[in-house]
Amino acid sequence: MIPEREASGTAAAADSGPAEILLDQVFDRAGLVSLRSAVAAHSSALEIRRETVEHLVLAAYELASNAVRHGAGKGRLQISVAGGVLRCTVSDEGPGFPEPDQAGRVRPEPTASGGRGLWLVRCVADQLDIHSDANGTTAVAEFPLD
């Protein structure tokens, strides 16, 4: 099952000019809680819908948790705005994984011990793009500003 909220719009948003970086922060396991608070504070300042803030915080936390758990134990998060789109980009230097474009597209079984993070992000974000190779993984979740 593919989460319903995913839409295509990345190319159009990318052509809208330079992004305004709202938050750029490195993190590790110890910094996940403070990262979540920073994302909430910076996104709330945009005066966007509360639901969008909640979805952004969830996505940022899940992507950062994955970077810590499956990546190199640390990562970098950027929150940016361009062309009416709010972007949450999380990158790590882990080993990467096969078929990143398929990650999180199927709802995990209720008894599964993990695997819900990317699925949840796909449910709340309008778009999730993942690039993974031997140098690491970058995930970009997009949310509309309106």
Image (tube, rainbow, N blue to C red):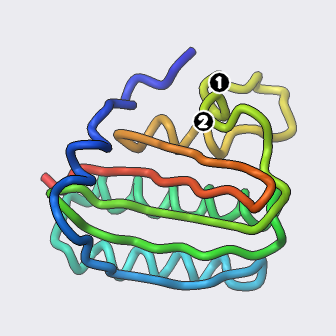
- Towards the viewer: 69 or 50: 69
Q: Quadrant of the N terminus?
A: top right
Quick check: marks 1 and 2 in contact, CB under 8 Å?
yes
The percent coordinates of residue 12 (x first, y second) are 21, 44
Residue 132, disc? none
Residue kind at label 1, given as amino acid type = Arg
Residue kind at label 2, given as amino acid type = Trp
Q: Would you identify the image quadrant in which residue 100 lies?
A: top right
Residue indicated by mark 2: 119
Would residue 105 be found to the left or right of residue 59 on screen? right
Q: Secondary structure at mark 2?
A: helix
Residue indicated by mark 1: 107
Looking at marks 1 and 2 on the same chain, the residue that comes earlier in the sequence is marked by 1
What residue is at 36 percent from the left and 60 percent from the top? 87
Q: Is residue 73 above or below residue 95?
A: below
Would residue 61 be found to the left or right of residue 133 on screen? left
Q: Is residue 119 above or below residue 111?
A: below
- Towards the viewer: 105 or 58: 105
Q: Secondary structure at mark 1?
A: loop
Would residue 36 be found to the left or right of residue 39 on screen? right
The percent coordinates of residue 107 (x first, y second) are 65, 24
Whole-Å distance between the Cαs marked 1 and 2?
Answer: 6 Å
The percent coordinates of residue 75 (x first, y second) are 68, 74
What residue is at 39 percent from the left and 58 percent from the top? 54
What residue is at 27 percent from the left and 74 percent from the top? 44
Check the image and name the residue furthest to the top. Answer: 1
Q: Label 1: few (<14), some or many (≥20) within 10 Å?
A: some
